[in-house]
Image: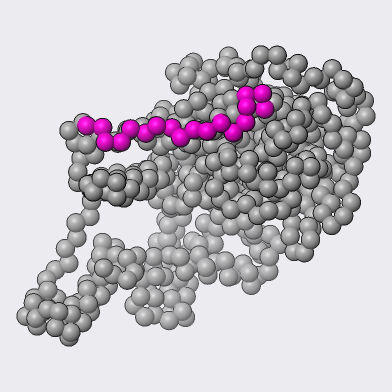
Amino acid sequence: MFQNPVAYNPVKYPEVSKKQRNLVLKQMMKYNKISQAEGEAAQNAPLVTDKQDIMKHDESHSAYFKSALRKEIQQWMVDYEKETGKSYNLEKDGLKIYVTLDSRMQNLAEEAVKKQLKVLQDQFFGEQRGRSLAPFYNISAAKRTQIFKQAMARTDLYKKMKAEGKSEAEIETVFNTPRDSVQFFTWNGIQYKKGKTLMDSIEYHKHILQAGLMSMDPKDGTIKAWVGGIDWNYFKFDHVKQARRQVGSTFKPFVYATAINQLGLTPCHTVSNERIPGKWSPRNANGKYGGSQDLRTALAYSTNIVAARLIMQTGEEPVIQMARDLGVESPIVKDPTIALGSADLSLYEMVGAMSAFANGGIYIKPQLILRIEDKQGKVIKDYTPQTREVVNENVAYTMIDLMKGVIDRGSGARLRNRYGMTAEIAGKTGTTNENSDGWFMGLTPNLVTGVWVGAEDRFAHFASTATGQGANTAMPIWAYYMQGVYKEGGKFGVTVGDKFDKPKDIEKHWDCSNTYGFHQYDEMYDPGPIIEGSGSESVGENYEIPDEEGQ
């Protein structure tokens, strides 16, 4: 076994691999583990590899799904051997693996990502043109150089040269020497440029925007589409399950759900919108304060003050526990700023968590696999969804009602007026500090889909929130995808006429007839035009809360 399987990869670097193999054989002869004759014969033998890849990662975005699928199956094989003593070889034993992915929905998802990212990428290149620190903001020139060098150190070529004993200066010379042909990813196909360096390629690809999309059936947990990135051949980092990014206001529903469940609040309950005195005094993105807001309006317009006051009433631990019960396993720091989305979570976790609200409060772990059969067709693993009740159906539907407000009159309203979406939709937008991450979580009765858009490095982002907010970067992908799904007229079990399950007499449970209803709110507060804005401020020492969309 080689100490560095990347640097000594016998398929990519046969000569380096052979040299290392012979070094090992030499040591074996030296310590009499093999005879001199055996060692010399082995050293003179050609390098033989047996590379097999049954689960091929093709050029489509589903390659990211296949990569995640392989990891899950390999973990199952380890667990299966521990339980039964029987082992399987994924490549050679003829296993039949039935997956949840719907190829038609996958194609729709890929096309939606491509359609939006092509437009955003052109805008981003235009914004960065001529900037000395491009594609980054708020960093020094030295930090910019450091980011590029770190990217260089992650390449296979760098690791290979390091293994060969090359110095840092020698390696940098290679990366900064013009070549006859250097590859560059574009949405119009791969371009080969002459006279460019490998470092030019690294700098260029730091400009490239990435995206992730995951879509699942909230009733049974089956994953229907999984777009982990924009091109597997160039970018093998999966932005569905592998990446963890700051989630911004997409976290707020967890805060609201905790408050509703713990304190018995209803959509009509009002919360003060006055500034909070003290060390942590978050700002509203629209800069408007005063009076109070009911929960429907506060979530629709993503009011930071209300979310902050809610977590102060419930405490941070119950909110974190709510996220845990909803399937979030990533670390969450106990801090009130999580109410505004300071936690780094995965898209996989967020979609699974949101699905519980569309499923009457029952969390179902997202599934990649339906069953596994051996080569004779015998079922050796039949996947049963892992489920648990997190909140009751009244709390779950209350959250759906609140998030419907986001679409009907809040930060997601452009789904109605720009994309012509008429179906019953609940959702939440999210935009993090400096517009580094754009999110949209869209819930329909039979399909929940989450989208993230951003660059590989958080310092690379759009300068303005009008362009970089989740409603402008991520939400259009959701719209294009769902337009395609609805156009198929129910082939996927998803139609424009689908309705969320509404508990009987839920309005009586809410008891919105008293004096703190909508009419009073509308008299004392005018939200103004729905234009998402940005507002971050220091929290304690050297810590910033995420930006959030306002109106």
Which residue occupies 88% across, 25% down? 516
Residue 489 visible at all: yes
Give the quarter of the image for residue 380: top left
Which residue occupies 84% across, 35% down? 271
> Can you say which quadrant of the picture contains the C terminus?
top right
**Does residue 410 lie above or below 278 as drawn?**
above
Residue 265, image x, y percentages? 77, 30
> Can you say which quadrant of the picture contains the N terminus?
bottom left
Any magenta on residue 214? no
Residue lying farthest to the left in this orientation: 37
The colour scheme applied to this rendered structure is one colour
**387 lies left or right of 14:** right
Q: Nearer the viewer, residue 242 or 152?
A: 242
**Does residue 521 lie above or below 342 as drawn?**
above
Residue 40, image x, y percentages? 10, 79
Q: Nearer the viewer, residue 523 or 155?
A: 523
**Does residue 142 lie above or below 512 as drawn?**
below
Residue 464 visible at all: no
- Magenta segment boundaries in residue numbering: 378-395
Which residue occupies 14% across, 68% down? 46
Q: Nearer the viewer, residue 406 or 60?
A: 406
Which residue occupies 43% across, 76% down? 171
Residue 240, image x, y percentages? 50, 44
Residue lying farthest to the bottom in this orientation: 30
Give the quarter of the image for residue 49: bottom left
- Total numbered circles: 0
**39 lies left or right of 111:** left
**193 lies left or right of 514:** left
